[in-house]
């Protein structure tokens, strides 16, 4: 079937009276013409070729893999509440857009998961959900080119994969229940200063996570410590946090370029969750100050000059897996020890770096002289949390 021109109103496909219209053949439209579904439930099982597809109201359901035209950008809810139901099939589209009406993309299948793959660029303010219409399986999302900007709160628990494209999550919990896989050529970005909450994160070779001016909150068991620190090491690059892959933050890179001592640090919660956020080298508990609590954490670990076992929480600020004089030099070089909170009050601003205090330097030097003795002592001081966490 070929739609030669866009309808003045309504749409080319509709079902009424509770029935279902099944379109088994391909649906084609020349450039400039819009394919539209007006109302009811319509099953598309023939694919086709068109650039623009409107679901005005009701449910458009896939009847096979790529049942809808794979090169189309689909507007869901173009006039009223509407649903794109993948029905357990895999569907490739150029993009998805929410119209004026409520918009949901999900699957009514009770037998298999569905995957929505996007190859173009679009912004979607609707809901990506596992199920619709009595389904019980999961929805997976794949970004395989261009960019997808999610501005709503999606509830899918299937895996989100980004490969050769960009996924921008504009709300803190926009994909909070979906494990994320960022593969070669793929980029994940957050917006604003709120933490980006994810169920899990895997960053493959050539994948990039850019936190911007925000932070990252990963659910318990959502990433291994070794994988996290390797991704941060790659993102750190030569210390400029412009590694081009791994986990980085453009706001941190800008601060470093402007001369401020900044990095990405991380802290693990008691439940196994992990928060990654901007921090100064030496702020082992990521509480916004570099103080005696941080020095005590380095001492308590017993890992100074041990040759292995370094982590941000016990003083490995350059992510080389060691805690040594290079880390201590970075910590002292910030000039922030015992200087109070170092984070700027306004997002994007860079706080002035105070001159090192001679008294603070003497204290730190004295403490460092005791580290070797502490390492050999049977008594261990437990790592200290921030003052606010006590």
Image (spheres, rainbow, N blue to C red):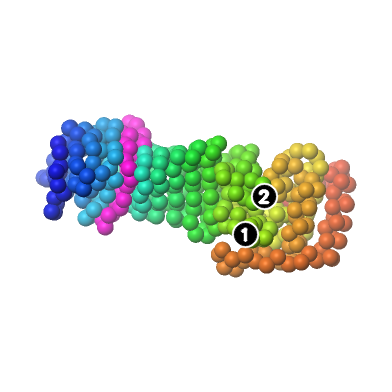
Residue at 84% of width from left, 44% of height from top? 375
Residue at 44% of width from left, 47% of height from top? 167
For the view shown, which residue lies furthest in the front direction? 31
Closer to the camera in the image, 151 or 157: 151
Q: How many marks?
A: 2
Q: Secondary structure at mark 2?
A: loop
Quarter of the image with the C terminus in it: bottom right
Residue at 32% of width from left, 40% of height from top? 93
Left or right, 164 with respect to 53, comes to right
| Quarter occupied by residue 31 | top left
**Marks 1 and 2, the one that precedes in the sequence:** 2
- Establish if 277 lies above or below 90: below
C-beta proximity under 8 Å, tags 1 and 2: no
Where residue 88 appears, as percent x and y from the top left, is 31, 34
Closer to the camera in the image, 50 or 31: 31
Quarter of the image with the N terminus in it: top left
- In this picture, which residue range is highlighted in magenta? 88-116
The residue indicated by pointer 1 is 255
| Quarter occupied by residue 226 | top right
Where residue 165 appears, as percent x and y from the top left, is 44, 43
Pointer 2: residues within 10 angstroms few (<14), some, or many (20+)? some
* Separation (CA) of disc 1 from disc 2: 12 Å
Left or right, 230 with respect to 331, comes to left
């Amino acid at each position: 079937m070929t739609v030669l021109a866009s309808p003045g109103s309504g749409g080319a496909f509709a079902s009424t009276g509770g029935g279902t219209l099944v379109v088994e053949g391909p649906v084609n439209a020349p450039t400039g013409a819009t394919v539209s579904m007006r109302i009811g439930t319509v099953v598309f099982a023939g694919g086709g070729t068109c650039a623009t597809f409107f679901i005005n109201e009701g449910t458009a359901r896939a009847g096979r893999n790529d049942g809808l035209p794979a090169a189309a950008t689909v507007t869901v809810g173009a006039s009223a509440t509407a649903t794109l139901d993948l029905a357990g099939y895999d569907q490739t589209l150029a993009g998805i857009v929410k119209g004026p009406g409520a918009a949901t993309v999900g699957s009514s299948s009770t037998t298999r998961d569905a995957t929505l793959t996007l190859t173009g660029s679009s912004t979607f303010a609707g809901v990506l959900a596992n199920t619709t219409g009595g389904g019980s399986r999961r929805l997976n999302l794949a970004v395989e080119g261009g960019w997808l900007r999610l501005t709503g709160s999606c509830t899918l628990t299937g895996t989100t994969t980004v490969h050769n494209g960009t996924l921008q999550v504009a709300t803190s919990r926009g994909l909070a229940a979906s494990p994320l896989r960022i593969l070669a050529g793929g980029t994940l970005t957050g917006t604003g200063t709120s933490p980006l909450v994810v169920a899990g994160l895997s960053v493959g070779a050539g994948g990039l996570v850019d936190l911007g001016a925000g932070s990252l909150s990963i659910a318990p068991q959502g990433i291994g410590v070794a994988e996290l620190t390797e991704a941060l090491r790659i993102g750190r690059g030569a210390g400029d946090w412009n590694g081009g892959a791994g986990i980085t933050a453009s706001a941190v890179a800008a601060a470093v370029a402007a001369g401020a001592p900044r990095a990405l640090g991380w802290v693990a919660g008691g439940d196994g969750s992990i928060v990654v956020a901007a921090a100064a080298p030496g702020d082992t508990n990521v509480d916004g100050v570099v103080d005696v609590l941080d020095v005590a954490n380095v001492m308590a670990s017993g890992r100074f000059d041990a040759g292995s076992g370094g982590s941000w929480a016990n003083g490995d600020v350059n992510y080389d897996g060691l805690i040594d004089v290079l880390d201590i030099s970075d910590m002292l070089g910030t000039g922030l020890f015992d200087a109070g909170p170092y984070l700027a009050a306004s997002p994007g601003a860079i706080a002035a770096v105070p001159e090192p205090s001679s008294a603070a330097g003497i204290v730190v030097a004295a403490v460092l002289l005791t580290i070797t003795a502490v390492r050999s002592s049977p008594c261990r001081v437990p790592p200290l949390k921030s003052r606010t966490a006590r």
